[in-house]
Amino acid sequence: MGFSMLGPVFKQMFKKPWTNKFPAKYQPSSTTKYLEAVGVGKAKINPPIPTPPNFRGKIKYDKDKCIGCNLCIKVCPCGAIESKPEEKKIKIYLARCCFCSQCNDVCPVKCLSMGDEFLLAGTDPYSKELIVE
């Protein structure tokens, strides 16, 4: 009974991983020095693997197509979308978003879609990169 997991463990040990080592192929001795070397062109960043189809990354917003119906605000479970009533447009705070795609599904004009970008980490949740307008 206690050895029932040995077979799957040994199989997994010899399988190729599904991910790649990002941002560096090998662990740098100092991350700060590595990033400085990338900045001056002495080192290269190992690109991440391509995202799969239907990946739920950073939300794309086509402001021109938006009609200001606010249905996306009503279905958002995180409260990540705010209305801009003077413009009849919306503002999306990605730091609050759980990337559930409910806003994309309910949009009648399909002005919202999920993108491929997934490197969204930051220290300021209200930075320009983490707000979609």
Image (spheres, rainbow, N blue to C red):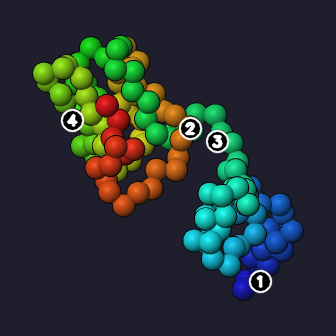
Kind of residue at badge 2:
Asp
Residue at the spot 79% in from the left edge and 68% down from the top edge: 12
Q: Are marks 4 and 2 in contact (CB under 8 Å)?
A: no
* Residue on which disc 1 sits: 3
Residue at the spot 86% in from the left edge and 68% down from the top edge: 14
Q: Earlier in the sequence, mark 1 or mark 2?
A: 1
Alpha-carbon span between mark 3 and mark 4: 28 Å
* Residue on which disc 2 sits: 116
Alpha-carbon span between mark 1 and mark 2: 42 Å
Tag in front: 1 or 2: 2
Using the rendered image of the protein, determine whether residue 76 is visible from the camera's viewpoint.
no
Residue at the spot 61% in from the left edge and 64% down from the top edge: 35
Alpha-carbon span between mark 3 and mark 1: 37 Å
Q: Earlier in the sequence, mark 4 or mark 2?
A: 4
Element carrying mark 2: loop
Residue 43 appears left or right of 72: right
Q: Are marks 1 and 2 in contact (CB under 8 Å)?
A: no
Kind of residue at badge 4:
Glu
Residue at the spot 82% in from the left edge and 72% down from the top edge: 13
Task: Please tell me the numbered disc located at residue 51.
Answer: 3
